Image (cartoon, coloured by chain):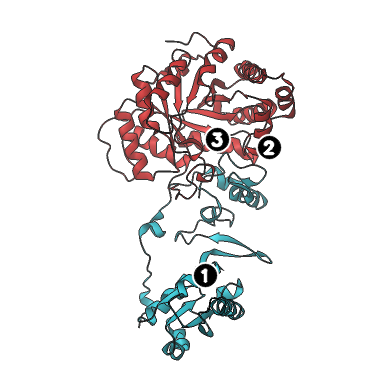
């Protein structure tokens, strides 16, 4: 899922400075699960903003809502009526949600309350780690189900580099060496011979490097 | 001959090769390059010019290599994958070989987290093994990675790094085999302090027959003080320093640490000369280029073949 975290409150307050009445919109999908932008966080953030603005002698009215999902046009209807009454929306969905809000409610500013961090999962309670770089050309079948693009600091396809020691990456003792994990897993699977082969240069054209991406599925088009 | 470089010729003669490292200045001061190069002239077969090592911005390895070439030294130009994509890399190789550079050491490159531009974007379009294969394709088939004919004749002696002290240890020789398969004509290892582990690695390398397919140079770096030895033992990923080496460095009397470091370095070289499959030594004397002559001389490596 998409992992995100809230922006510093100071940054949010600065964005909202010109406004007196806003919609604070959460999202019921990924950011609810990673506890950055769900219904609960909408409530907490709304209170924080109200208190700060009250103390500054410049109160703000905030309407709270949480959409089923902010990443699909059909759910935008859930915010339609509420948007009529406000000057702007502060979305605490991922960047996809903020952009869909902006596109749907074209005449009102949509502000991002979160930083969209990465694609990953909660490794343990309160700890989220990156797993996928959405490169558009999956190699997990070659690398024991561990992604070197997302998890190696250098995205090496023929790792590990010389900086791997005691299972950790050269950039930090807090970062696992993806290639140690790959080696261990392939060893456990009896597939170490995979690693004797040179993986050729990657076709990054399917990644962001190829420009903004788009998929057209003729079979689904009406 | 693949390149006709001096380094290649020394290996062909079967002479134990010697190279040293030269770090370019953090600016365009040619005097710094000349001063460092002066100490290395006649002392080594080729000089490695680092490519923004530890991700610190310095004069480019291509320009520095050309400067020392003009001084009569032979450069081994380092090329990392951190800062250039496959277009930049291939273009720079055309330029470098046009300027007369004949050796290239292919590296993935230290992550920018170590340097002075930690907010930069890294590239790593290719990795070091893929880089070797691309340069081999340019040299041997006259084709770029994209398949275009190369105008001209690119002659290059291709090098790669190997770290016998990185993990997972048992995979390190296999990874070296990949580098050899990809095109590594010579190998420079990470600095050797742990001779037992190095010997164990060399055995695995020989068992795979790699020493007959590439020229392996042991890497050495003289320690400067007990403090440096302790720091490196604890904090530098991919380098192991046995306790006894640290103890020797720490026990050296005040002002004698450097001499002890050089003594250890010379002892290491003497041992490397005796190991089957080790064809040379690469001396990494960081900002200590002026101490290289005494190391080379006392290790009995002079005169160098002309």
Which residue has dot 1 on it?
A114
When asked about the image quadrant of residue B168, the answer is top right
Which residue has dot 2 on it?
B234
As drawn, B112 above or below B43: below
Which structural element holds mark 1? strand
Q: Position of residue A108 (x, y in %)?
A: 38, 81
Distance between mark 1 and mark 3 Cα atoms? 44 Å
Q: Position of residue B175 (x, y in %)?
A: 56, 38
Can marks 2 and 3 be said to lie on one chain? yes
Q: Position of residue A111 (x, y in %)?
A: 45, 74
Which structural element holds mark 2? helix
Distance between mark 2 and mark 3 Cα atoms? 26 Å
Q: For label 1, count other residues whose C-alpha is less than 10 Å away and answer few (under 14), some (14-19) or many (20+).
A: many
Subunit that carries the residue with mark 1: A
As drawn, A53 above or below B133: below
Q: State the residue in front, A136 or A94.
A: A94
Can marks 1 and 3 be said to lie on one chain? no
Which chain does red denote in the image?
Answer: B
Q: Is residue B1 visible?
A: no
The residue sitting at 41% across, 54% down in the picture is A204
Task: Check contact, mark 1 vs mark 2: CB within 8 A.
Answer: no
For chain A, the rendered hue is cyan
Subunit that carries the residue with mark 3: B
Distance between mark 1 and mark 2 Cα atoms? 38 Å
Which residue has dot 3 on it?
B176
Residue sitting at the far front: A57
Task: Between label 2 and label 3, give the one nearer the viewer.
Answer: 2
Can marks 1 and 2 be said to lie on one chain? no
Q: Position of residue B274 (x, y in %)?
A: 62, 16
């Amino acid at each position: 899922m998409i992992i995100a975290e809230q922006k510093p409150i100071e940054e949010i307050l600065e964005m909202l400075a010109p406004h007196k009445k806003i919609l604070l919109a959460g999202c019921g999908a990924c950011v609810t699960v990673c506890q950055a932008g769900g219904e609960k966080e909408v409530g907490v953030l709304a209170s924080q903003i109200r208190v700060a603005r009250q103390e500054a002698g410049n109160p703000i009215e905030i309407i709270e809502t949480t959409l089923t999902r902010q990443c699909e046009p059909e759910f935008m209807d859930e915010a339609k009526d509420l948007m009529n009454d406000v000057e702007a929306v502060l979305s605490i969905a991922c960047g996809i949600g903020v952009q869909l809000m902006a596109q749907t409610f074209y005449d009102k500013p949509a502000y991002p309350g979160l930083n969209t961090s990465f694609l990953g999962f909660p490794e343990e309670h309160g700890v989220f780690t990156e797993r996928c770089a959405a490169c558009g050309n999956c190699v997990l079948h070659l690398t024991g189900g561990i992604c070197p693009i997302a998890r190696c600091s250098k995205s090496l396809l023929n790792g590990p580099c010389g900086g791997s020691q005691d299972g950790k990456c050269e950039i930090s003792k807090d970062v696992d060496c993806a290639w140690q994990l790959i080696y261990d897993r392939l060893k456990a699977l009896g597939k170490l011979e995979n690693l004797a082969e040179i993986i050729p240069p990657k076709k990054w054209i399917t990644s962001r490097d190829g420009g903004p991406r788009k998929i057209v599925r003729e079979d689904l088009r009406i | 001959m693949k390149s006709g470089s001096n380094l290649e010729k020394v290996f062909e003669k079967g002479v134990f090769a010697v190279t040293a490292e030269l770090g370019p200045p953090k600016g365009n001061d040619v005097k710094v390059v000349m001063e460092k190069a002066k100490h290395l002239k006649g002392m080594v077969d080729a000089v490695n010019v680092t490519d923004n090592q530890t991700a610190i911005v310095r004069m480019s390895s291509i320009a520095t290599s050309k400067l020392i070439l003009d001084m009569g030294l032979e450069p081994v130009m380092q090329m990392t994958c951190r800062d250039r994509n496959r277009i930049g890399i291939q273009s720079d190789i055309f330029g470098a070989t046009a300027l007369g550079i004949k050796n290239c050491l292919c590296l993935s490159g230290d992550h920018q987290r170590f340097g002075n531009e930690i907010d930069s974007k890294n590239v790593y379009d290719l990795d070091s093994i893929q880089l070797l294969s691309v340069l081999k394709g340019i040299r041997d088939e006259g084709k770029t990675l994209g398949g275009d004919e190369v105008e001209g004749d690119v002659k290059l002696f291709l090098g790669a790094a190997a770290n016998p002290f990185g993990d997972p240890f048992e995979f390190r020789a296999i990874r070296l085999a990949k580098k050899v398969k990809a095109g590594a004509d010579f190998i420079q290892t990470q600095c050797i302090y742990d001779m037992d582990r190095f010997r164990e690695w060399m055995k695995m390398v020989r068992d795979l027959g790699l020493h007959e397919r590439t020229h392996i140079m042991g890497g050495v770096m003289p320690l400067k003080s007990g403090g440096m030895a302790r720091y490196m033992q604890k904090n530098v990923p991919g380098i192991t320093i046995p306790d006894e080496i640290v103890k020797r460095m720490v026990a050296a009397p005040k002002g004698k640490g450097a001499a002890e470091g050089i003594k250890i370095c010379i002892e290491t070289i003497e041992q490397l000369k005796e190991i089957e499959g080790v064809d040379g030594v690469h001396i990494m004397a960081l900002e200590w280029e002026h101490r290289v002559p005494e190391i080379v001389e006392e290790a009995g490596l002079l005169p160098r073949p002309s």
